[in-house]
Amino acid sequence: MQLVYIGVRELVEMNKLKKISTMQPTIIKPKPLWTGKQVISTILKNIVVSGMNESQIKRSNKKCGLNLESKSRLSAKEWGSIGKEEGEVIFRDNEHL
């Protein structure tokens, strides 16, 4: 989670972000581990919340944030048989899918 803190450190120091919310780790035992996609998603979600005031957060029932579909630099065939989906980069509501 050091990467998450480094990503939002400036917001914490400027008191724009009171609490860092994290996602559940993918691997729980023997120790909690997060994927790279979870780290990126956690940073994005915290940045969006820091830009909103408390009344906007309470009123916002719909999700808002980064939405993007793009091709990655490496094609899916370069990942081999395990990377069929790795040829695309997809963000939905600040979550890297």
Image (cartoon, helix red, strand yellow):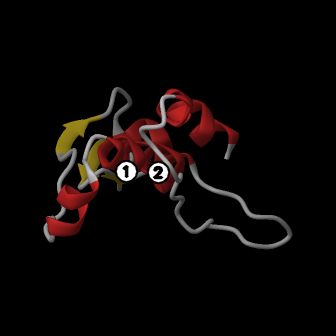
- The residue carrying pointer 2 sits among few (fewer than 14), some (14 to 19) or many (20 or more) residues within 10 Å by Cα, namely many
Quarter of the image where the C terminus is located: bottom left
State the residue at coordinates (41%, 47%). Answer: 46
- Judging depth in this view, the residue of 85 and 56 nearest the camera is 56
Q: Nearer the viewer, residue 88 or 16?
A: 16
Instruction: Please indicate whether residue 19 sits to the left or right of residue 58 in the image.
Output: right
Looking at the image, residue 62 sits to the left or right of residue 72; the answer is left
Q: Residue at x 48, y 46 (%)?
A: 80
Q: What SS does tag 1 mark?
A: helix
> Left or right: 44 with respect to 68?
right
Structural distance between the alpha carbons of marks 1 and 2: 5 Å
Considering only vertical position in the picture, is 95 above or below 7? below
- Mark 2 and mark 1 in contact (Cβ < 8 Å)? yes
Res 29 visible:
yes
Res. 87 visible in picture: no
Few, some or many C-alpha atoms within 10 Å of disc 1 (few <14, some 14-19, many ≥20)?
Answer: many
User: What amino acid type should be assigned to the residue bearing mark 2?
Assistant: Thr
Circle 1 residue: 45
Point 37% across, 53% down: residue: 84
* Dot label at residue 12: none
Residue 55 horizontal side relative to residue 89, left or right: left
Exactly how many numbered labels are in the figure?
2
Residue 73 place in picture, x, y as percent:
34, 26
Callout 2: helix, strand or loop? helix
Q: Amino acid at mark 1?
A: Lys
Res 42 label: 2
Measuring 52% from the left and 63% from the top, which residue is drawn there?
Answer: 23
Residue 34 picture location, percent across and down: 63, 56
Locate residue 48, reporting x and y percent.
30, 45
- Give the camera-side residue of 33 and 3: 3
